[in-house]
Amino acid sequence: MTMPTTEQILQLVIGGTAYETRLTAKFARRKRYVAPDPHVVTCVIPGVIRSVSVRKGMHVRTGEPLIVLEAMKMQNDITAPHDGVVRAVRVAPGESVTKGAVLVELE
Amino acid sequence: MPTTNKHIDFFKRKDRLLNGGGHKAVEKQTALGKLTARDRITALLDANSFYEFDLFVEHRCRDFDMDKKVLPGDGVITGTGSIMGYPVAIYAQDFTVAGGSLGLMHARKITKIMDHAIKMGMPIIGINDSGGARIQEGVDSLAGYGEIFYRNTLASGIIPQISVILGPCAGGAVYSPALTDFVFVVEGISKMFITGPEVIKTVLGEEISMEDLGGARVHSEISGNAHFYARNELECFHKIKQLFTFIPWNNRKKADPYPAKPPKSKFDIERVVPMDSRKPYDVRSVICALSDNSDFLEVHAQWASNIVVGFGRINGETVGIVANQPAVLAGVLDVDSSDKAARFVRFCDAFGIPLITFVDLPGYLPGVDQEHAGVIRHGAKLLYAFSEATVPKITVILRKAYGGGYIAMCSRHLGADFVVAWPTAEIAVMGPEGAANIIFRNDIASAPDPGEMRKQKVAEYSEKFANPYVAAAAGHIDAVISPATTRDFLIHAIQISANKSETRPFKKHGIPPF
């Protein structure tokens, strides 16, 4: 029932005051927030690319299908988040993709 | 007993069934460091107290040549007995019989003993050690799970429900433990997950071991699915017995009182809490300095440890204790700690256990991850749970009680029956630094030396507001008391709360922010 001595006491600032305390493992490992880039279409669920319907330089409109991603036994249409020109296609049919992978970049 | 053919037949039949899956399967079980289902029941219950139900039940599957298979007890042992004299219903899945897989009759045995426990008003313990649904029985085994979940929900708040994970508990099976009040896990033995490492690898390409995915440590430290962690099965059973000394049989009975005992002298209430409110200390030392015999059974000890919850006794009576832990994350409220405390408060309220809350927190944890993880709705659970609770609610403010954190920690405004503060308490809308920066923004900005001016203004604010007397003057707290008299106050508060009655307008049920 005593404070563990091996763990480092760190400072946590709340309301302008620095408190001396330990951190939880979960807090120490938390990811820094990175603002999403609206021009980059990323993969939200891991799966396999079934088909790619756009090429570099093509104009696309909001909601237009870019890629068919098979995941969880479903064929999912990945659509354009906004109007624009395709700057790059980062995946090819048959490729396995993980969550967060970049699929298509728009301008 | 006369040895007629019928008696010989009876003993033969029984003997065959008592051996479970046979000695080879039992050897496999023990090689994994696991006790058999029958040994677990023996180790957990009082000697010779177990009366078995449904030993002779047989499975009814006729597909896939299953009709030729004998599955003793259909892979689960059920019955009633006692733990230190307390009546208890129990079931233990037998991994030696078809991997403890759950078929229709296996599930029927479990639901029968659950119904019995609800009617008799006694706690139920489920020992989980099963490979999952018996695939040969198809949708019947799904029906079995559903019927168990339904009863877990009906029994919730009527009888204490305890789940012990002593083997795999995967897929749908995990939801019975998740619906129960206390989940026990054992190092190296417990494995809980919805989808296992194999599926995750196939579908997601992520490789992870069973232990790292859903082992005992994961669920007691990260997911919060487990309430109690033990290094081995016997330690686990010891902890269950300890828990039984604190909780009542059902929601119509009070927990049995114990002989009152003073706290142990090594816990000196006067020396635990540092004056400087930025300095940490272990709030469990405050609890142990106040509870009978310094006994404290911590629930969720490894998860969200910035709040401490658990059971103790004051003057022989069981109390539920909720306390901010300045030693971890400065004792802030966040998603997990709100969730943890809210659930504990609801258990205590359902089973008539008075609540004592110790307050020392700087507020809520700032951060994008917290906001995006829903600290608003998770934090609301704690407000809901404290406001909803009608058991005696006693709050002691040790040091900081700032802003929304002050309100959430069972303040008078959420219906606390007693709120007292130590002379070291700082009950204010926010910490002096933050408050001074806002109130004296212009004075600080226009001063020739803003740093010096800020210091001066912080000191000025501290002097005026970082104390318990502003709140006491408004009647938001009832009294300022010294640490030394706190135990006497708690004994008094518990005694005069014995006949507390608080009724609320009728409703079917509230809608807590799950």
Image (spheres, coloured by chain):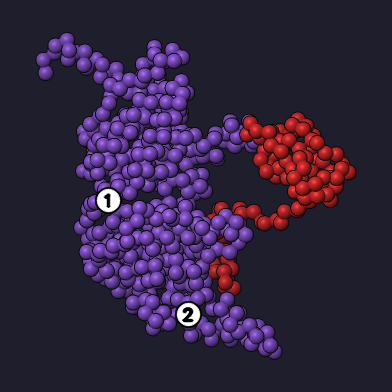
The numbered disc on residue B251 is 1
Left or right: where does residue B45 sit relative to residue B514?
left
Q: Which of B491 and B501 is in front in this view?
A: B501
B247 sits left or right of B32 in the view: left
| Left or right of residue B21, residue B459 in this image | right
In the orientation shown, which residue stands out farthest toward the right? A57
The residue at 39%/83% (across/down) is B473
Q: Quadrant of the N terminus of chain B?
A: top left
Give the residue type that dot 1 points to: Asn
Residue B353, horizontal then vertical, whole percent: 30, 57
Count the numbered circles shown. 2
Where A15 sits versus B93, above or below? below
Q: Colour of chain A?
A: red
Which residue shows up at 49% across the image and 72% down it? B402
**Mark 1: few/some/many CA within 10 Å (<14, 14-19, 20+):** many
Q: Which of B238 and B116 is in front in this view?
A: B116
Instruction: Identify the residue under disc 2.
Output: B466
Q: Up-down: is A107 above or below B13?
A: below
Chain B colour in the picture:
purple
